[in-house]
């Protein structure tokens, strides 16, 4: 391997590779960077040199300098060099239209080898997308050299910069909250950190700054924000990480509208700054059940021109007994129209029906509207007026199909059709990829039933305020209490969630009671917040926006891992550093921890 040479001020860049244009022609410049590719045509050596501004072709010609040309024969991909030469236009017909600097090349008269590179585990370029992700994460420093990854990470940095600029301009104060705090077992699992000076006791890494930002409102700060690091020990997906970043916001003496207007200004300003896209405000608003009934999701993708419809009234009176019985017992019949679905073959319809069963449906009935006729196995059970009403409610026309599902549970039935809606929209190209559709979803249920623990649990968190109209149901009918919670949805992705908080200690006590917390349990878990609430608390509320997820959407990435410099894989491991790792016994002893190996007997 070649030995690197001494770098000094005489070899510092005078220009970036990606900024060369007509003004540089005939001038001598120095560039520093990585060799992205090398071509030796048996005489002249062509190298694509890369830095974070872009690429430039540099040329080693033996007729210019035979000694330098001979030295250049040892150069390979990803070597780091400094190169000096004269900018020249490429010969006619040899321009590279795919490079910003593709009309020019640097004719080298000398270079300095700064650092050689060993053979690479994969080629750096757009083809790297096809490389196994764990391999890319193991050699993340190579993966991050790709133009795509450079763009993603730099875009994320611009998002963070705009965040501070925007909230500072709105008189918010940025305040850091503790990273080592108290475990409050509600929601996802905590990451625990043992305390050496307090043997047997543990800190928890914050799942969010929730309690502290509420205390800041009690402290009189009025408007708070933070680009906060958060930690949750939960199963991972494309849009989840064990350690993640959120834009955390809290305000005092406000209503839902105030929070929503602040966030609309932030999100519309962000898209304008990063993408040059104009977004209409105010955003659309829809309550939780309207979203489920229309789109089968509490984070609907409004770029898809398909709405579910309710056929319960038709099948509740029709002669098809299975559906009629379900409706009579309080169930529902919902339908999903598909434009152009009349052309689907029997095999294609059977595949869609099989998908519905895998989603948990007992079955899926299909109607096809062909040449003025309605075809389908259930047509014979409907009279002409019922078929006419079915066509009207579903807004179907000749050439369409209608997929009908019945279920005892309204929410589950809608969600199953909602999943099918997304799948069919992707499959048949029904998503408007050039649109940015924002939506506020409101009036979520305050509680949901936990089948494992056999008690009510919080849909958001236990400090979410109930809708005051439902206050009397808190103890008698918890399942039908609406919350003052709201989610910000963008193109079918929840990018933020928040709520008006409970500021009245007596209401907080009722909420804890509904969650089956005894006064002792509530005091043990949240005692310092309850004490603070009793010390004069302003009405307040806030929201947390997922910075990683926002970056993913604005970069057009498929996973938040593509917008985080050093992410964990789907097993919550860092292939680059090897975290998590085994700790030496002596370190465990210092922390008063004894490790018991997992065996079949004690698993």
Image (spheres, rainbow, N blue to C red):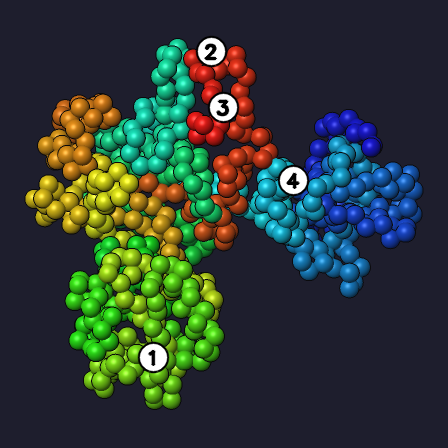
Give how far apart the Cα atoms at labels 1 and 2 are.
71 Å
Q: How crowded is mark 1: few (under 14 residues within 10 Å), some or many (20 or more)?
A: few
Q: How crowded is mark 3: few (under 14 residues within 10 Å), some or many (20 or more)?
A: few
Q: Viewer-nearest of labels 3 and 4?
A: 3
Q: Are marks 1 and 3 in contact (CB under 8 Å)?
A: no
- Residue 511: x, y in percent? 16, 36
| SS at mark 3 in the image | loop
Say whether disc 3 or disc 4 marks the residue closer to the N-terminus: 4
Say whether disc 1 or disc 3 marks the residue closer to the N-terminus: 1
Give how far apart the Cα atoms at labels 1 and 4 are.
57 Å
Q: Which residue is drawn at 54% across and 29% down?
A: 579
Find disc 4 in the rendering and name its residue: 142
Find disc 3 in the rendering and name its residue: 597
- Residue 104: x, y in percent? 74, 53
Give how far apart the Cα atoms at labels 3 and 4 are.
37 Å
Place residue 566 in its image quadrant. top right
- Residue 369: x, y in percent? 36, 83
Say whether disc 4 or disc 2 marks the residue closer to the N-terminus: 4
| SS at mark 2 in the image | helix
Q: Do the residues labelled 1 and 4 touch (CB within 8 Å)?
A: no
Farthest-out residue, front: 601
| SS at mark 4 in the image | helix
Q: Which residue is drawn at 43% across and 41% down?
A: 235
Place residue 436 in its image quadrant. bottom left
Q: Which mark is residue 590?
A: 2
Q: Viewer-nearest of labels 3 and 2?
A: 3
- Residue 587: x, y in percent? 50, 14
Say whether disc 1 or disc 4 marks the residue closer to the N-terminus: 4
Q: Which mark is residue 377?
A: 1
Q: Residues within 10 Å of mark 2 (few under 14, many from 20)?
A: few
């Amino acid at each position: 391997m070649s030995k690197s040479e001494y770098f000094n001020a005489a070899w510092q860049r005078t220009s970036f590779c990606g900024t060369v244009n007509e003004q540089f022609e005939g001038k001598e410049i120095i560039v520093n960077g990585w060799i992205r590719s090398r071509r030796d045509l048996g005489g002249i050596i062509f190298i694509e040199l890369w830095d974070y501004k872009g690429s430039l072709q540099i040329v080693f010609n033996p007729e210019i300098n035979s000694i330098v040309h001979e030295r250049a024969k040892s150069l390979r991909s990803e070597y780091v060099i400094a190169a000096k030469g004269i900018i020249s236009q490429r010969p006619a017909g040899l321009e590279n239209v795919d490079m910003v600097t593709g009309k020019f090349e640097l004719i080298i008269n000398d270079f300095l080898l700064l650092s050689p590179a060993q053979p690479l585990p994969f080629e750096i370029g757009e083809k790297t997308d096809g490389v196994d992700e764990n391999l890319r994460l193991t050699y993340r420093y190579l993966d991050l050299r790709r133009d795509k990854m450079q763009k993603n990470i730099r875009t994320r940095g611009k998002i963070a910069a705009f965040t501070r600029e925007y909230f500072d301009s709105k008189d918010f104060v940025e305040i850091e909250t503790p990273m080592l705090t108290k475990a409050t077992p509600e929601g996802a699992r905590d990451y625990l950190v043992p305390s050496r000076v307090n043997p047997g006791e543990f800190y928890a890494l914050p799942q969010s700054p929730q309690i502290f930002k509420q205390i800041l409102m009690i402290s009189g700060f009025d408007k708070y924000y933070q680009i906060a690091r958060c930690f949750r020990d939960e199963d991972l997906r494309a849009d989840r990480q064990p350690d993640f970043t959120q834009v955390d916001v809290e305000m005092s003496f406000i209503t839902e509208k105030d929070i929503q207007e602040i966030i609309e200004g932030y999100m519309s300003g962000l898209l304008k700054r990063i993408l040059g896209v104009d977004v209409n405000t105010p955003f659309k608003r829809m309550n939780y059940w309207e979203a489920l009934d229309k789109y089968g999701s509490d984070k609907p993708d409004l770029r898809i021109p398909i709405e579910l419809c309710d056929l319960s009234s038709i099948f509740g009176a029709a002669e098809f007994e299975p559906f009629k019985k379900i409706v009579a017992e309080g169930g529902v019949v919902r339908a999903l129209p598909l434009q152009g679905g009349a052309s689907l073959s029997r095999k294609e319809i059977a595949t869609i029906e099989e998908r519905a069963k895998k989603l948990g449906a007992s079955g899926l009935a299909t109607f096809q509207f062909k040449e003025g006729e309605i075809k389908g196995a259930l047509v014979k059970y409907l009279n002409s007026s019922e078929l006419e009403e079915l066509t009207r409610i579903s807004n179907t026309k000749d050439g369409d199909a209608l997929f009908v599902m019945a279920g005892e549970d309204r929410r589950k039935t809608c969600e199953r059709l909602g999943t099918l809606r997304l799948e069919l929209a992707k499959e048949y190209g029904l998503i408007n990829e050039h649109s940015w559709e924002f939506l506020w979803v409101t009036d979520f249920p305050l509680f949901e039933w936990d089948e494992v623990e056999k008690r009510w649990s919080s849909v958001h968190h236990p400090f979410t305020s109930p809708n005051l109209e439902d206050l009397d149901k808190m103890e008698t009918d918890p399942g039908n209490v609406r919350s003052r919670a709201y989610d910000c949805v963008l193109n079918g992705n929840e990018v933020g969630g928040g709520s008006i908080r409970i500021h009245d200690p007596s209401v907080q006590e009722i909420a804890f009671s509904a969650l089956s917390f005894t006064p002792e349990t509530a005091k043990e878990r949240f005692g310092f917040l309850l004490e603070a609430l009793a010390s004069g608390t302003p009405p307040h509320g806030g929201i947390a926006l997922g910075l990683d997820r926002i970056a993913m959407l604005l970069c057009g990435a498929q996973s938040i891992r593509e917008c985080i410099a050093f992410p964990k894989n789907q097993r919550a491991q860092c292939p680059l550093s090897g975290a998590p790792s085994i700790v030496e016994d002596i370190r465990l002893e210092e922390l008063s921890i004894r490790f018991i190996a997992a065996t079949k007997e004690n698993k």
